[in-house]
Image: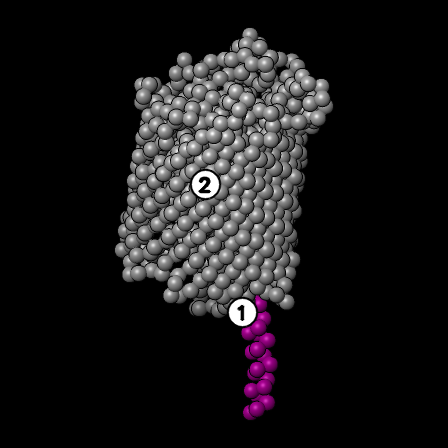
């Protein structure tokens, strides 16, 4: 009998094993979510090391793995900006069911504005409109300035000075009205000028967000347009060496851009992690459809280092970065006399001498910029006292601007010194306390202290020597009940300016003191599992910036004359905005509407042309006025087929100067964008392919005042772009991405209204960009 049982086992077990091997038709599918806010994590990576098989989630966070054998496995889930996590995976057939739906959550380390629990799930309470730049959008715009990168987000434009300098504009607001939070601290630079691009290396960060409106009171006051939040991913917690290599080439200006990132953690000291990163960039003259723009090259050399130590109740992080850049200014914007200036504006093309062929050489006029950041951050967590965050940072900015012509003094000319040079040192301390939750209330309190000193290091004092002491306090209260959540915020800020300006060969001192307040009441109501409604009321004040008070004379970077007014009053903004969002099945729809009245809005009033010893330039005067800005941003997407998706974005804006009963100058024109994407995944090796076609139509800005414009706004234009990308896993820990993008596909000749050099030259023509990214 015992022998019969043994014989049966010898027959049945191999047969069962063989049957199991033959039925390797198990499938697993689901979504990957952010653990905090429940948002999907597009293009998350999933890998089963025992089977050497993986998948990449699509743009909606959906993934699928097929042809799996029953058994016990480990699945590793990872995403840019998250720590990788491992989960147990047990595949057992239940009757005829050979498929499993399994969702995964990862700890994402982007900055949280608020968090609230509604309808049994975690949703982030950002009552103001928040837009996140996806990993895919960031990849497709690498190598571009920050303003151009953020143009992928609806309602965000770029205000430009020539081909290479751009700053973000959010719903018609720019410069000091858009504050940048870089690596968790307020970016301190010579940001008062529209031709001063933010000194930020895109390769040093992985998460980009835009907060519309002035409601995020914990970060900064005076941000009437909103915030740009830039963050690096969290330091690695897994032992080993990891890295990322980027290489990029663009055909139009023969741009070469490379970046290397290395990071690691050791088993010896598992609580300690590190990261180093560096990038280099070089480009030559920009080509329009018909000619090159002389002296429009760029050079950059940037680097950063990040060290962190993390324990259960506290962690500390030390960050350092340096940005170095030289930017050529189009020579055709610097004109010798009034007649030539007026002729340059009338001409359809620049003079032949300003249409030089391709060259990498950067000559006068140009800018040289250095920006340095050092930050020490401490986080301490307790059950009884909540969470405490302390940040100390020092930022140092050097800006040098070189005129087209050297000094007429031979000795000074031989030194090649800049005509305009500033050094700005900023030291800041931030303290944030998240108070333990009391019933339905969550409280956040904070104080910020900033000390700035600006020194003029040139014979020209377009901006004078000054110091600024800034003291801020803010409080944020959050209340929630079922489907409704409310947020109340208050910020008070005191600015103390001390100015020393050279007048008639004597230094004179001036003092200014401004108390500014920002208040916000916002709410979010969940109508259903797929619908939400937001409403915000905001009052905000912004004191005048140093250039608005004291700018005096030629601003080389913008090729214009600007004159301040020390009697300017602070801006007072009254705003209301609302958004409705629905995500259901194959389609998503979102509309954001806003209305903002600003009393004593500070703007540059054109006053005509002036001739100086440096040449002839357009002239402007800083003034106060009352304005009304309103508009809407609408986004609609529909999944036409499983692999085919359509998206439409519409942005409308109207601005009025109420004091003068006319239109507000330098407002973006209305525009509409359409994108079509086809993507599919190779089931055998989990490689991912994407093809895209995009179209952007910008209407002519017909809302303008003839007496304020040096030239009639340019005509409407259409731009097409196509793209292709391929991503594959080389093994569990490494992947390769290759992409190709063609912008201005039809080589359209056009000029953009928001480019201050639109008077002199066309925009960039067709540009083919090839990029390679290797993660290991």
Q: Does the magenta run of residues contain 709?
A: no
The residue lying toward the viewer, choosing from 439 and 548, is 548
Q: Which residue is mark 1?
A: 72
Q: Which residues are magenta?
A: 1-25
Which residue extends farthest bottom? 1
Q: Picture coordinates of residue 30 (x, y %)?
A: 45, 56
Mark 1 to mark 2 CA distance (whole Å): 62 Å
Q: Residue at x 58, y 71 (%)?
A: 18
Which residue extends farthest top? 339
Q: Residue at x 34, y 55 (%)?
A: 443
Q: Picture coordinates of residue 177 (x, y %)?
A: 42, 34
Q: Residue at x 45, y 24 (%)?
A: 564
When asked about the image quadrant of residue 10, the answer is bottom right
Q: Picture coordinates of residue 717 (x, y %)?
A: 48, 22
Indicate left or right for 106 with 568 as reference.
right
| Mark 1 residue element | strand
- In this rendering, the answer to whether 541 lies above or below 109 is above
Q: Does the magenta run of residues contain 5?
A: yes
Q: Visible in this render: residue 332?
A: yes
Q: Picture coordinates of residue 103 (x, y %)?
A: 45, 59
Dot 2 alpha-carbon crowd within 10 angstroms: few under 14, some 14 to 19, many 20 or more: some
Dot 1 alpha-carbon crowd within 10 angstroms: few under 14, some 14 to 19, many 20 or more: few
Q: Which residue is mark 2?
A: 469
Indicate left or right for 199 with 569 as reference.
right
Q: Visible in this render: residue 199?
A: no
- Residues at marks 1 and 2 touching, judged by CB atoms closer than 8 Å: no
Q: Is the stretch drawn in magenta largely helix, strand or loop? A: helix
Quarter containing the N terminus? bottom right
Indicate left or right for 648 with 761 as reference.
left
């Amino acid at each position: 009998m015992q022998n019969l049982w043994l014989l049966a086992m010898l027959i049945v077990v191999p047969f069962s094993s063989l049957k199991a091997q033959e039925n390797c038709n198990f499938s697993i599918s689901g979504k990957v979510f952010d653990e905090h806010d429940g948002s999907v994590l597009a293009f998350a990576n999933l890998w089963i090391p025992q089977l050497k098989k993986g998948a990449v989630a699509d743009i909606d966070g959906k993934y699928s793995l097929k042809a799996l054998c029953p058994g016990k496995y480990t699945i590793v889930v990872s995403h840019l900006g998250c720590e990788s996590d491992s989960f147990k995976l047990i595949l057992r057939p239940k009757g005829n069911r050979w498929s499993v739906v399994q969702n995964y959550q990862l700890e994402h380390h982007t900055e949280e504005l608020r968090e609230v629990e509604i309808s049994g799930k975690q949703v982030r309470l950002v009552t103001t409109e928040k837009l996140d730049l996806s990993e895919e959008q960031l990849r497709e715009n690498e190598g571009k300035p920050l303003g151009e990168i953020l143009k992928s987000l609806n309602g965000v434009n770029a205000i430009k000075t020539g081909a290479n300098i751009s700053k973000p504009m959010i719903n018609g607001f720019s410069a000091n009205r858009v504050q940048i939070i870089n690596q968790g601290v307020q970016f301190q630079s010579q940001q008062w000028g529209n031709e001063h691009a933010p000194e930020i290396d895109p390769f040093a960060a992985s998460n980009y967000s835009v907060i519309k409106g002035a409601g995020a009171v914990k970060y900064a006051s005076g941000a009437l347009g909103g915030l740009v939040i830039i963050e690096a991913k969290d330091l690695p917690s897994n032992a080993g060496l990891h890295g990322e290599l980027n290489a990029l080439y663009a055909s139009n200006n023969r741009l070469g851009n490379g970046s290397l990132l290395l990071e690691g953690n050791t088993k010896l000291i598992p609580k300690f992690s590190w990261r180093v990163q560096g990038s280099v960039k070089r480009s030559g003259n920009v080509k329009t459809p018909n000619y090159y723009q002389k002296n429009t090259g760029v050079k950059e050399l940037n680097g950063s280092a990040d060290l962190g130590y993390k324990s259960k109740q506290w962690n500390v992080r030390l960050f350092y970065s340096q940005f170095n850049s030289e930017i050529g200014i189009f020579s055709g914007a610097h004109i010798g006399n009034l007649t030539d200036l007026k002729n340059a504006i009338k001409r359809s093309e620049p003079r032949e001498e300003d249409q030089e062929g391709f060259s990498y050489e950067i000559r006068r006029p140009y800018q040289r910029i250095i920006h340095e950041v050092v930050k020490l951050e401490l986080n301490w967590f307790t059950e009884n006292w909540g969470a405490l965050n302390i940040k100390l940072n020092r930022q140092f900015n050097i800006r040098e601007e070189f005129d087209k012509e050297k000094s007429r003094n031979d000795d000074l000319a031989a030194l090649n010194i800049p005509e305009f040079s500033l050094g700005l040192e900023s030291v800041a301390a931030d303290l944030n306390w998240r108070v333990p939750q009391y019933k339905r209330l969550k409280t956040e309190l904070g104080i910020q202290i900033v000390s700035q000193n600006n020194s003029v290091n040139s014979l020209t004092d377009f901006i004078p020597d000054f110091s600024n002491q800034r003291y801020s306090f803010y409080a944020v209260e959050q209340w929630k009940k079922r489907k409704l959540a409310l947020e109340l915020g208050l910020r008070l800020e005191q600015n103390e300016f001390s100015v020393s300006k050279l007048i008639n060969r004597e230094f004179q001192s001036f003092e200014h003191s401004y108390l500014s307040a920002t208040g916000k009441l916002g709410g979010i109501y969940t109508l259903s599992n797929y619908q939400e409604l937001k409403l915000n009321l905001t009052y905000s004040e912004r004191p005048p910036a140093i250039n608005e008070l004291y700018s005096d004379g030629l601003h080389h970077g913008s090729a214009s004359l600007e004159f301040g007014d020390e009697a300017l009053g602070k801006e007072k903004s009254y705003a209301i905005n609302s958004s409705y969002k629905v995500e259901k099945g194959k389609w998503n729809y979102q509309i954001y509407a806003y209305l903002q009245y600003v009393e004593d809005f500070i703007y540059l009033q054109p006053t005509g042309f002036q001739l100086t010893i440096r040449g002839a330039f357009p002239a402007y005067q800083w003034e106060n006025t009352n304005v009304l800005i309103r508009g809407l941003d609408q986004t609609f997407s529909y999944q036409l087929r499983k692999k085919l998706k359509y998206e439409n974005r519409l942005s409308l804006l109207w601005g009025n100067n109420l004091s003068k009963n006319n239109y507000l100058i330098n407002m973006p024109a209305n525009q509409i964008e359409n994108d079509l994407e086809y993507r599919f995944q190779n089931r055998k090796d989990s490689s991912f392919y994407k093809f895209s076609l995009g179209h952007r139509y910008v209407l002519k800005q017909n809302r303008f005042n003839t007496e304020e414009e040096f030239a009639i706004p340019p005509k409407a234009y259409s731009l097409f772009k196509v793209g292709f990308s391929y991503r594959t896993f080389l093994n569990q820990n490494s992947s390769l991405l290759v992409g190709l993008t063609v912008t201005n596909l039809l080589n359209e000749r056009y000029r953009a209204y928001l480019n201050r050099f639109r008077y002199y030259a066309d925009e960039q023509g067709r540009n083919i960009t090839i990029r390679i990214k290797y993660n290991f």
